[in-house]
Image (cartoon, helix red, strand yellow):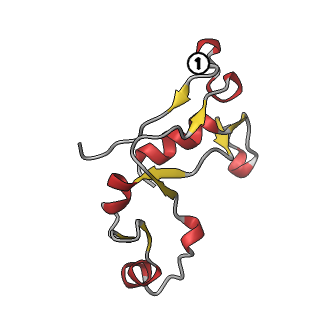
Amino acid sequence: GTVDTWLLYQLTGTPITESTEGGLNTHGNVGGNFMTDVSNASRWLFLDLKKVQWDKKLVDAVCSPHDVPLSSLPQVKASSEVYATLKKESTGIDKLEGVPVSAILGDQ
């Protein structure tokens, strides 16, 4: 996904503090909302603009010979709606508790 997808995922996920993969300590969140807005999704060239959903034929045409499942792409949402409500657990910031994430914009 694009940076908007990563930010939303990180702001709404569950914190992890360590990974034994390769012996590296990592920080981040997992299991957050995996979404993007229609303006960012349209830039990927995989979006059916009339249906506002991912088009398997376009994904296959661009990503062939790899079989990329549509479930590996973020959910496409409107540019302005409430996607989530922030929690201190995800952000680490008390004052962000309860703040809605209500816009994702790209190429504006």
| Most foreground residue, 7 or 104 | 104
Q: As displayed, is residue 107 above or below residue 72?
A: above
Quadrant in which residue 30 is drawn: top right
Q: As displayed, is residue 37 above or below residue 41?
A: above
Q: Count numbered badges in the picture.
A: 1
Q: Amino acid at mark 1?
A: Leu
Crowd rating for badge 1 (residues with CA inside 10 Å; few <14, some 14–19, many 20+): some
Q: Tell me which residue sits at (61%, 17%) in the image.
A: 93
Farthest left residue?
A: 108
| Most foreground residue, 63 or 33 | 33
Q: Is residue 42 left or right of residue 57?
A: left
The percent position of residue 68, horizontal first and vertical second, equals: 53, 76
Q: As displayed, is residue 16 above or below residue 36?
A: above
Q: Tell me which residue sits at (34%, 42%) in the image.
A: 105
Which quadrant, please, contains the C terminus?
A: top left
The percent position of residue 2, horizontal first and vertical second, equals: 41, 51
Q: Tell me which residue sits at (32%, 53%) in the image.
A: 39
Label 1 secondary element: helix
Quadrant in which residue 32 is drawn: top right
Quadrant in which residue 83 is drawn: top right
The percent position of residue 3, horizontal first and vertical second, equals: 42, 45
Which residue is label 1 attached to?
96
Q: Is residue 57 left or right of residue 33?
A: left
Q: Is residue 50 left or right of residue 54?
A: left
The percent position of residue 75, horizontal first and vertical second, equals: 53, 58
Q: Tell me which residue sits at (74%, 37%) in the image.
A: 18
Farthest top residue?
A: 95
